[in-house]
Amino acid sequence: MDEKRRKDLKEYQRRRTERRRARGLTVKTIWIRDEDTEAFAKATQPFVDHARLIEGVTGSITLEPSELKDILERNQFPYTLEDLMFLINLRQTIILKPHEEKESWSRASEILEKYGFKIELDELVW
């Protein structure tokens, strides 16, 4: 990897880390006994899923509707699939229905407030 590419990648990772921290996400690296791996994965899966939902809503990762549904059902999070899909598709909705832009922004704001997401509206349409 050349120096410019290495520098660009480092800058991208720094910005991505800043965005994740701003949303209340953090990395936790720990050591566990090998025989505890399965129990640990089961115990931490809801926390991992919650972070994935937040990243999916902001577009940091792509989550298919079926995956969102599975995560919601597995963890019984208080979110509705409809609300999450609305947030994920906000940019597309604004482009396809510009006459509904004001209402779309308003609904997105209400959803973010309803669930207490640490996400800015503009993060939904980048």
Image (cartoon, rainbow, N blue to C red):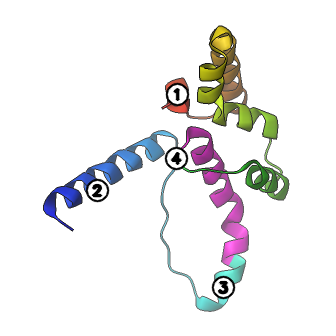
Q: Are marks 1 and 4 in contact (CB under 8 Å)?
A: no
* Residue at the spot of label 2: 9
Q: Nearer the viewer, mark 3 or mark 2?
A: 2
Mark 2 secondary-structure assignment: helix
Q: Which residues are magenta?
A: 40-59
Q: Are marks 4 and 2 in contact (CB under 8 Å)?
A: no
Q: How would you rate the neighbour count of disc 2 (Cα within 10 Å): few for under 14, some for 14-19, many for 20 or more?
A: few
Which sits earlier in the primary sequence, circle 3 or circle 2?
2
Q: Amino acid at mark 2?
A: Leu
Q: CA distance from mark 1 to mark 3?
A: 38 Å
Which sits earlier in the primary sequence, circle 3 or circle 4?
3
Q: CA distance from mark 4 to mark 2?
A: 16 Å
Which sits earlier in the primary sequence, circle 1 or circle 2?
2
Q: Is residue 123 visible?
A: yes
Mark 1 secondary-structure assignment: loop
Residue under the image location 81 percent in, 50 percent down: 69
Q: Amino acid at mark 4?
A: Ser
* Residue at the spot of label 1: 120
- In the rendered structure, find residue 36 and report the number of the disc placed on it: 3
Q: Nearer the viewer, residue 70 or 28?
A: 70
Q: CA distance from mark 1 to mark 2?
A: 25 Å
Horizontal side of 101 relative to 65 (left or right) equals left
- Farthest residue toward the front? 96
